[in-house]
Amino acid sequence: MKFIHPTAVIGENVIIEDDVYIGAYCVIGMPPEWKGKEHIDKGVLIGKGTRITGMVTIDSGAEHQTQIGENCYLMKHSHVGHDAILCNNVTLSCGAKIGGHTIIATKCNIGLNAVIHQKQIISEGCMIGMGAVITKKLITTPYKKYAGNPAKCIGDNLIK
């Protein structure tokens, strides 16, 4: 069963799988914020079991579909840029911002108000700390914790 709040705005090319919750004032599948490519709409795929709480924005892809995996949890005011891929079991905390073309691997947890530069790859099981800034130069390692501005590795993420 799906639930889509009546205030949510869902674009034409959005595919929503089973057991998805979309809360109030979400905007999903609107044109990519990519100068000169705003007219392209490759859409968004939202995997089964995902919960999108409220006031979340997810831009449509320009080169390929923007993808939200299964059993993801996107909290209020988070944003997923065009052509990004969130694999299964990813959590975006309130205010997290994911740049376009970014890949967030399985079991990652992105902290409150963290910012991830476009075209970045976050390795499996990483924890990105509150307010962290992931720059284009950072290369992440699976199951590590990153914090700071710019973010640096601060240890192992023991939650697997």
Image (cartoon, rainbow, N blue to C red):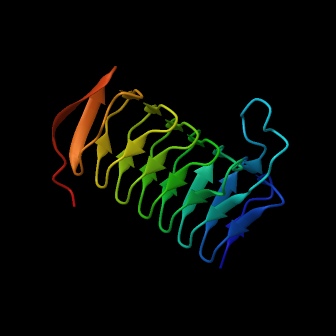
Residue drawn at 42 percent across, 56 percent down: 90
Is 37 displayed left or right of 147 in the figure?
right
Which quarter of the rendering shows the C terminus? bottom left
Along the line of sight, which residue is nearer the eye, 20 or 103? 103
142 over 114 or under it: above or below: below
Which quarter of the rendering shows the N terminus? bottom right
| Residue 17 placement (x, y as % from top left) | 64, 74
| Residue 156 placement (x, y as % from top left) | 14, 45
Residue drawn at 20 percent across, 56 percent down: 159
Number of dots carrying numbers: 0
Along the line of sight, which residue is nearer the eye, 79 or 82? 82
151 over 56 or under it: above or below: above
| Residue 54 placement (x, y as % from top left) | 63, 48
Is 149 displayed left or right of 92 in the figure?
left
| Residue 138 placement (x, y as % from top left) | 32, 31
Residue drawn at 44 percent across, 39 percent down: 120
